[in-house]
Image: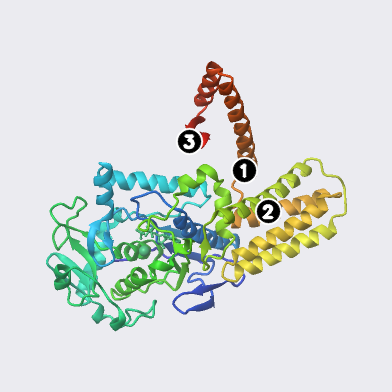
Amino acid sequence: MTPSESPVQPVSGTFPDVYLHDTMQRRKVKFEATTPGRVGMYLCGPTVYSDAHVGHAKKEVAFDVVRRYFTHLGYQVRYVSNITDVGHLQNDSDDGEDKIAKRAALEQLQPMEVAEKYFWSFMDDMARLNVLRPSIQPRATGHIGEQIELIQELIARGHAYESNGSVYFDVRSWPNYGVLSGRKLDDQEEGTREEVRSEKRDPRDFALWKLAEPSHIMRWDSPWGQGFPGWHIECSAMSLKYLGEGFDIHGGGLDLEFPHHEAEIAQSEAAGHPFARYWMHNNMLTIGGEKMSKSKGNFTTLQDLFKRLDPMVVRFLLVSSHYRSITEFSDDAFVSAQNGYKRLTDALQEVERRLKDAPQHDDSALLAKVQAHRDAFEKAMRDDFNTPEAVAALFGLTRDVNAALSGTVGHAGLEAAQAAYHELGGAVLGLFAEGQAAAHDDTAKLDTLMELVLQARQSYRINKQYAESDALRGRLAEVGLTIEDTKDGPRWKK
Ligand SMILES: Nc1ncnc2c1ncn2[C@@H]1O[C@H](COP(=O)(O)OP(=O)(O)OP(=O)(O)O)[C@@H](O)[C@H]1O
Ligand SMILES: [Zn+2]
């Protein structure tokens, strides 16, 4: 496989030092770009077979912030994140049911319809969370050729073998297997069906290509017959294709460190392609102390959550904890996120309101304070993207801005405060999408308004004025607002 990277030119300029926690070295290290001024990042994206939950959002938001911060520092960032639309098998051991096919049977859809449906649902959720679109979002099914080519290279170099129409990576042939997770080969276990075990030279060998059973719908021609790629190979093929060998940063959830990322490294480097230079992993979003996950069934989809919470509050909650820390999902956490976010947006709105008609005033004291909070924000971000401390800097800013707003503030002070909110809270943390502060305010107003409407409707009903009550409901339906009567009383929905 030829990584199709055309040579990229360095970007001139000076770039402040950024330290990040590299999983491979298990410590914070100074980031050095392969090409000065450019950052190539790859993030393992979603398998599109169900709606995204809040845990997925933690990962997407974490790496979106990393990308945004490098951009803020002046780097040209190429952000590649894949879409897994090949149905992979239910468990990691090359065994079990195909997740997309299983969903397709359940929903009476074609597997590709499932992938398409949940791809767009994921994109909508991410847009609402103000996650920037990747520079390139390659789909696994669009890169079968590249995956086959990489597998052929591995066979040619003696690191993979064919068995019954499937191809496996030969872990014994690659002493570096375990380099990321620190696992010794002998400690690794693999519980696999006997039939699959017997195809492998070693039970820990992982599939690069799987022979398709007659019932398997998603299948492609290959030198080994009709089949489909293994779970790990797409990420190697697509990251190398779009970012080139030795690209800068590879990210993903901590649960992917082994086996997924270990396998990505082995199959890329054994084929002769130096892989990612830094590895970053986000910790988990938990509920009641347990990882939120589809298989445990303890998840809340983003779509459900957005019915009761502004997506920006969800984002605020996520950036308020560090990407390497556990984030506990609870109602209390949301209440405090709601309050915290409102403090920021209220101050920003007041600054913007006052800017329209700002008096002449000496703002030097406020200007110095704004600068100090900016410095604190940058220092936190350069230290492994410490977003909770960066958020604390925004609160510090808000405290000083509110104090200043209780007296006279001139144009320069207001403008400096506004710029700090937009550049740090907005561009870097992604908390104020264009017009977001105003939209947040509108949402709050709509909530109040609808509460009053529901009360009015209740009194119509108590007074048996059913025609009026129905008319009210009908009029709201015309503008897309529905009222539902539930056992807990009436509810409204957009
Ligand atoms: N609770 C979570 N917190 C943080 N990241 C998560 C969480 N759940 C999933 N992710 C990340 O999202 C990506 C895809 O997750 P995946 O589709 O396997 O979801 P899942 O809910 O864990 O599913 P399953 O339970 O079937 O394994 C992975 O990189 C994973 O690390
Ligand atoms: Zn991956």
Q: Earlier in the sequence, mark 2 or mark 1?
A: 2
Query: Can you tell me which quadrant of the image ligand 1 is in?
Result: bottom left
Residue 421's disc is: 2
The answer to whether 345 appears left or right of 329 in the picture is: right
Give how far across and how far down residue 138 sits, in percent. Answer: 36, 55
Give the residue type at disc 3. Answer: Lys
The answer to whether 346 appears left or right of 446 in the picture is: right
What secondary structure is marked by label 2? Answer: helix
Callout 1: CB less than 8 Å from ligand 1: no
Residue 353's disc is: none
User: In the picture, residue 435 is in which quadrant?
Assistant: top right
Q: Residues within 10 Å of mark 2 (few under 14, many from 20)?
A: many
What secondary structure is marked by label 3? Answer: loop
Q: Is 468 situated above or below 291?
A: above
Callout 2: CB less than 8 Å from ligand 1: no
Q: Is residue 372 visible?
A: yes
Q: CA distance from mark 2 to mark 1?
A: 15 Å
What secondary structure is marked by label 1? Answer: helix
Give the residue type at disc 2. Answer: Tyr
Observer-side mark, 3 or 2, equals: 3
Give how far across and how far down residue 478 sits, in percent. Answer: 50, 24
Q: CA distance from mark 3 to mark 1?
A: 29 Å
According to the image, label 1 marks what residue? 440
Q: Residue sitting at 60 percent across and 37 percent down?
A: 447
Observer-side mark, 2 or 1, equals: 1
Q: Earlier in the sequence, mark 3 or mark 1?
A: 1
Q: Residue sitting at 43 percent across and 47 percent down?
A: 123
Q: Earlier in the sequence, mark 3 or mark 2?
A: 2
According to the image, label 3 marks what residue? 487
